[in-house]
Amino acid sequence: MMFDAAERETTVTFEPNADYSLADVAEPVKGYADDCFITDFEDALTSRGIHFTRDEKVVPLAA
């Protein structure tokens, strides 16, 4: 059980160009199925030297 948990929303943003696209970033994580995490996409972007931004919001649960 968890009490006083918060919901987290994380957005990773990058701009595709002629050298890479969303498909190029998604390819390394295709086989992860339900075990795919936001950090898997960040790792894929980092390994390709692609600049990205990360925005994380913590939303408290309503009482």
Image (cartoon, rainbow, N blue to C red):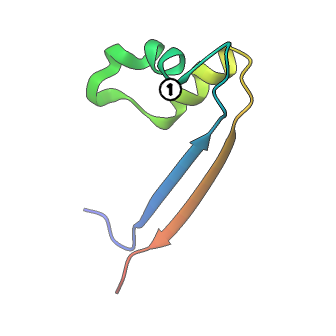
Residue holding disc 1:
40
Percent of width and height locating residue 9: 48, 56
The image quadrant where one finds the C terminus is bottom left
Is label 1 in a helix, a strand or a loop? helix
Q: How many marks?
A: 1
The front one of 8 and 18 is 18
- 24 vs 6: above or below: above
The front one of 36 and 13 is 13
- 20 vs 62: above or below: above
- 63 vs 30: above or below: below
- What residue do we see at 49% from left, 36% from top? 38
- What residue do we see at 28% from left, 23% from top? 33
The front one of 12 and 17 is 17
Percent of width and height locating residue 47: 66, 14
Q: Amino acid at mark 1?
A: Asp
Percent of width and height locating residue 2: 31, 64
Percent of width and height locating residue 34: 27, 30
Q: Say few, some or many: other residues with alpha carbon within 10 Å of mark 1 (under 14 / 14 to 19 / 20 or more).
A: some
